[in-house]
Image (spheres, helix red, strand yellow):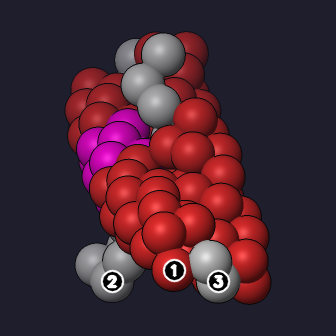
Amino acid sequence: MSYNEPSKTSGQFHSTKGNAVEAVGNLTGSSSWQQSGKQEHAQGEAEYKAAQTKGYAEGTMDRMGGKKDAVVGAVTGDKTQQTEGNMRRDKGEAQQNLNRNV
């Protein structure tokens, strides 16, 4: 598991690798491999969830900041700010959707 920023890719890798190690342990009867695989799988799942949560929070910030910019742009008549705000809001919404718990 990465000790830097959580990563969905790294989390998926470790989750899958843990499943494979556990399967080898099941086939060979090695309880240490079974336990090691379960542990790596759990760590991978935790890293994936942490990355997902971080991505959702970042999307929320973009969505809120974009909405604010769009409203300020509309009120002041600044079409550029309004358009950029709408684009940032849409980007944040897409990031939230991508990281939503299903």
Q: Considering the numbered disc 3 on the image, is that residue within a helix, a strand or a loop?
A: loop
Looking at the rendered structure, the kind of residue marked 2 is Asn
In magenta stretch: residue 53 = yes
Q: Which residue is mark 2?
A: 4
State which quadrant residue 55 falls in: bottom left
Tell me how far mark 2 sits from mark 1, CA to CA: 42 Å
Residue 31: assigned label:
none
Who comes first in sequence, dot 2 or dot 1? 2
In magenta stretch: residue 50 = yes
Looking at the rendered structure, the kind of residue marked 3 is Asp
Where residue 43 sits in the image (x, y, percent)? 30, 47
Q: Residue at x 42, y 25 (%)?
A: 101
**Magenta part of the chain:** 43-54
Q: Is residue 47 visible?
A: no
Q: Which residue is mark 1?
A: 76
Q: Which residue is mark 3?
A: 78
